Image: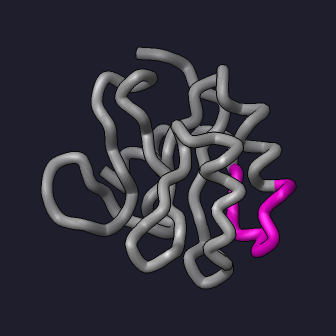
Amino acid sequence: MADYKMMVWIDQDLCTGDGICEEIAPDVFEGRDDGLWVVKEEARHFGSTLVFDDEAGDGHGPEGARGVARVPDSLIEDVIESAEECPGECIMIEPYNPELVAEGR
């Protein structure tokens, strides 16, 4: 199992739907049909894609604070830039906590 240093989630109440996050880090952020963004773990980094959009079924997980995504080390800089550029200041970055990540699965 890989070691991760960081995880990320989006506070849906603060998301403005601007989409800068997905422009900067498309392997971590994905737009929903309602115009807001969610986090994801992309298959190229984790073997399968998991979108934290609160939808039912395989490949989906909870959104918001319960839906925290692991960030591959190669994307840490991009995720930090996304958080800094976000006009809604809704991108929450936290140190990696395997127990918290496991709760959202």
Seen at 81% across and 71% down, the residue is 87
Of all residues shown, which one is farthest toward the right? 84
Residue situated in front as seen by the camera: 34 or 54: 34
Seen at 39% across and 72% down, the residue is 33
Seen at 60% across and 43% down, the residue is 7
Residue situated in front as seen by the camera: 21 or 47: 21
Of all residues shown, which one is farthest toward the bottom? 13
Q: Which span of residues is magenta-colored?
A: 84-93
Residue 90 as seen in the image, left or right of residue 22 = right
Q: Quadrant of the N terminus?
A: top left
Residue 103 as seen in the image, left or right of residue 18 = left
Of all residues shown, which one is farthest toward the top? 1
Q: Is residue 49 above or below residue 94?
A: above
Question: Percent x, y for residue 59?
Answer: 23, 47
Q: Is residue 89 magenta?
A: yes
Q: How many marks?
A: 0
Q: How is the image coloured?
A: one colour
Q: Is residue 95 above or below residue 44?
A: below
